[in-house]
Image (cartoon, rainbow, N blue to C red):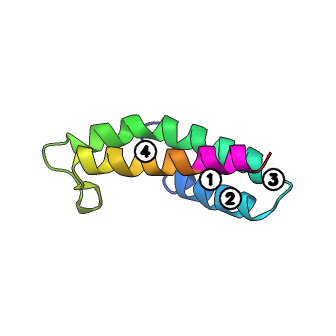
Amino acid sequence: MAGVPDGEPGVLELLGAAGLLLPATRVAAALCLLALMLAMFPANVYASRMPDPPKSMTTRLSVRTATEIVFLAAAVAVAIGSR
């Protein structure tokens, strides 16, 4: 992703996952992960359309989209269920 240092999204995802484990930060972590996933999805679309993508980005767009929907629904469920 342009403008994002290598590894930073992974660190943010790990911090969000850790935040989900603590009741005091669970809702905020779920909402932040939701925002992060929505912000990163255009990069997934771009990667799926690359003519010669890196091996780590060879998943078809339909599979990426379905997976993203599951993760987004999980984040929403945690945010709503923890209130």
Which amino acid type is marked by label 1? Leu
Task: For label 3, count other residues whose C-alpha is less than 10 Å away and answer few (under 14), some (14-19) or many (20+).
Answer: some
Q: Is residue 69 left or right of residue 31?
A: left
Pick whichever, 51 or 82, lies toward us: 82
Query: Which residues, given as a range, are shown in magenta?
Result: 75-81
Along the polypeptide, which appears first: circle 4 or circle 2? 2
Q: CA distance from mark 1 to mark 3?
A: 14 Å
Residue 32 showing in the rendered view: yes
The label on residue 12 is 1
Nearer to me, 15 or 63: 63
Q: Quadrant of residue 21?
A: bottom right
Mark 1 to mark 4 CA distance (whole Å): 19 Å
Q: 68 or 52: nearer the eye?
A: 68
Mark toward the start of the polypeptide (1 vs 3): 1
Tag 3 residue: 25
* Residue occupying the point 59% across, 56% down: 13
| Amino acid type shown at disc 2 | Leu
Magenta residue check for 50: no
Give yes or no for contact between labels 1 and 2 (Cβ–Cβ under 8 Å): yes
